[in-house]
C-alpha cells in the first residue's frame, strides 16, 4: 500500500526516514551547475542530505561533432534536441532497457492535459496516447519512483506545491533543453515506461535554456529537506506555503523610526520575545497579506478563516 501522501512541508513534524536525495542533472553546460557547490546546497551535500551530479549530454553522443540537436520536422527556426541522444543518457541514469512503445494512435493524452495538442487528431503530435499506458502510475507517490523533470517555457508553472511534493522524492533527474527545445516524444516515452515525468516553466518569459530554471527549481525543492535550513518555522510561515498560501506581509526590523519612516505601532506594541507572534500581530498581518495577495496575484484569499487564535 502506498504511503499516505501529504503536501505538508517535510519539516512540519512528519516522521521521515533519513534518505539522501539523489539529484542528476543533464545539460550541455554541466559546468553551469558548479555554482551548486557554493552556499546552502553545498553544505547540504557535505551533510549528506543530497547528492547532486551534473552530467554532460554530449557524453552520450557517438558522432565526431557530438551533436545533440537537429532541424525541426515541419520547418521553423532553430534546432530541436534529438531523442536518440537523450534516450541513451536517460536509460542509463534511470536503469531502463530500450523498448518500442505500442499505443492506440486514435486516443490522445498528455500528462499536462494539453488540450491544444489533443485537438489536432490526425497528426503525429496527437499520438500522445503512449502516456495512457502509464496513466495509473501517476497515482503512486513521487517518493517511490524517480521523477524526471524537463524545464519547458510552454509547460505549466512550477509552484511551491510542486516544490513541496518533489521534496519527498528520493531521486530527481533534470533534463535541460537548449535551442528550440527537445523532441516531444522524450517525455512521452518515459511516461510510457512508468517514470513520473514532469514539465515545468518557471514564469512567463523565455530563457535561452533550462539551466537557470533547474537552479530555481532545485533551490525551491532542496531548502524544504529536513535539516537543510536552520529555522523550520520560517519555512512554514513564508509566502506560498500553508493552508491559504498568502503572500507574506511586510517585514520590519529596528530602529522603530528610520529616516522618518516608522514601523507600524501595532507591531511595536505587540513585540514580546523573538519567536512569539501575538494575536494583535496576527490580526495586522493577515489582512495585509490578503490585500497583497489579491492585488498582486490571480488568487482571491479566503477572508472567512479566523484571523487570530486566542
Ligand atoms: Cl523552464 N525554460 C526556458 N527555456 N525558458 C523559460 C522557462 C524554462 N521558464 C520560463 N522561461
Image: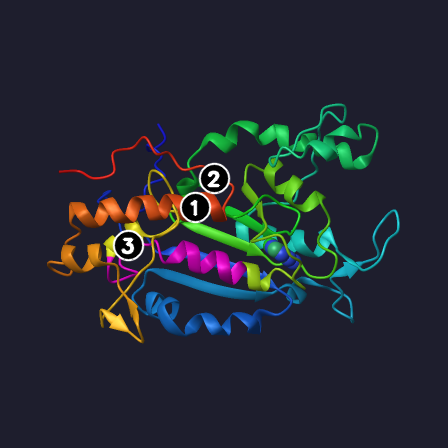
- Count all numbered tags in the image, as a single digit: 3
Q: Secondary structure at mark 3?
A: loop
Residue 169 shows in this picture:
no
Find the distance from the CA under tag 1 to the CA under tag 3.
28 Å
Identify the residue at the far right of this view: 75
* Residue that badge 1 annotates: 293
Q: Position of residue 289 (x, y in %)?
A: 36, 47
Q: Is mark 2 within 8 Å of ligand 1?
A: no
Mark 2, residues whose alpha carbon is within 10 Å: few (<14), some, or many (≥20)? few
Instruction: Name the one closer to the observer, 62 or 52.
Output: 52
Determine the secondary structure under disc 1. Answer: helix
Q: Is residue 185 magenta?
A: no
Which type of secondary structure does the marked residue at label 2 adopt? loop
Residue labelled with disc 2: 299
Q: Mark 3 — residue?
A: 226
Q: Which residues are magenta?
A: 214-231
Q: Quadrant of residue 51?
A: bottom left
Q: Quadrant of the C terminus?
A: top left
Percent across and percent down for residue 24 are 50, 59
Foreground: disc 2 or disc 3:
2
Distance (Cα) linking label 2 and label 3: 29 Å
Instruction: Look at the picture and state if 269 lies above or below 146.
Output: below
Q: Residue at x 32, y 41 (%)?
A: 8
Query: Tags 1 and 2 in contact by the CB under 8 Å rule?
Result: yes
Could you classify mark 3 by the number of other residues whose Cα lies within 10 Å: few (under 14), some (14-19), or many (20 or more)? Answer: some
Specify the farthest residue to the front. 260
Going 77% across and 37% down the picture, which residue do you hit? 125
- Asked whether 252 or 236 is in front, the reply is 252
306 lies above or below 283: above
Residue 269 can be seen in this image = yes
In which image quadrant can residue 114 be found? top right
Please report whichever mark, 2 or 3, sits nearer to the chain's N-terminal start. Answer: 3
Amino acid at each position: 500500500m502506498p504511503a499516505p501522501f501529504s503536501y505538508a512541508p517535510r519539516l512540519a513534524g512528519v516522521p521521515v526516514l533519513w534518505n539522501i536525495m539523489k539529484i542528476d542533472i543533464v545539460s550541455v553546460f554541466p559546468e553551469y551547475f558548479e555554482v551548486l557547490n557554493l552556499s546552502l546546497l553545498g553544505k547540504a551535500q557535505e551533510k549528506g542530505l543530497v547528492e547532486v551530479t551534473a552530467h554532460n549530454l554530449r557524453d552520450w553522443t557517438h558522432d565526431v561533432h557530438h551533436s545533440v540537436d537537429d532541424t525541426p520536422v515541419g520547418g521553423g527556426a532553430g534546432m530541436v534536441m534529438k531523442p536518440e541522444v537523450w534516450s541513451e543518457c536517460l536509460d542509463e541514469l534511470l536503469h531502463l532497457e530500450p523498448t518500442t512503445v505500442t499505443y492506440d494512435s486514435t486516443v490522445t493524452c498528455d500528462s499536462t492535459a494539453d488540450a491544444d495538442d489533443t485537438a489536432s487528431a490526425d497528426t503525429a503530435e496527437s499520438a500522445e496516447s503512449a502516456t495512457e499506458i502509464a496513466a495509473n502510475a501517476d497515482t503512486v507517490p513521487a517518493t517511490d519512483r524517480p521523477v524526471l523533470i524537463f524545464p519547458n517555457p510552454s509547460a505549466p508553472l512550477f509552484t511551491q506545491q510542486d516544490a513541496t511534493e518533489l521534496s519527498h522524492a528520493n531521486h530527481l533527474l533534470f533534463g535541460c533543453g537548449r535551442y528550440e527545445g527537445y523532441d516531444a516524444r522524450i517525455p512521452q516515452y518515459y511516461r510510457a515506461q512508468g517514470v513520473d515525468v514532469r514539465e515545468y516553466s518557471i514564469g512567463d518569459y523565455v530563457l535561452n535554456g533550462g539551466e537557470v530554471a533547474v537552479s530555481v527549481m532545485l533551490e525551491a525543492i532542496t531548502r524544504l529537506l529536513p535539516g537543510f535550513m536552520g529555522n523550520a518555522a520560517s519555512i512554514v510561515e513564508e509566502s506560498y506555503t500553508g493552508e491559504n498560501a498568502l503572500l507574506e506581509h511586510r517585514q520590519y526590523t529596528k530602529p522603530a523610526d528610520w529616516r522618518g519612516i516608522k514601523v507600524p505601532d501595532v507591531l511595536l506594541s505587540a513585540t514580546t520575545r523573538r519567536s512569539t507572534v501575538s494575536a494583535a500581530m496576527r490580526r495586522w498581518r493577515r489582512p495585509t497579506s490578503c490585500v497583497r495577495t489579491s492585488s498582486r496575484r490571480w488568487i482571491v484569499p479566503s477572508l472567512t478563516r479566523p484571523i487570530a487564535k486566542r
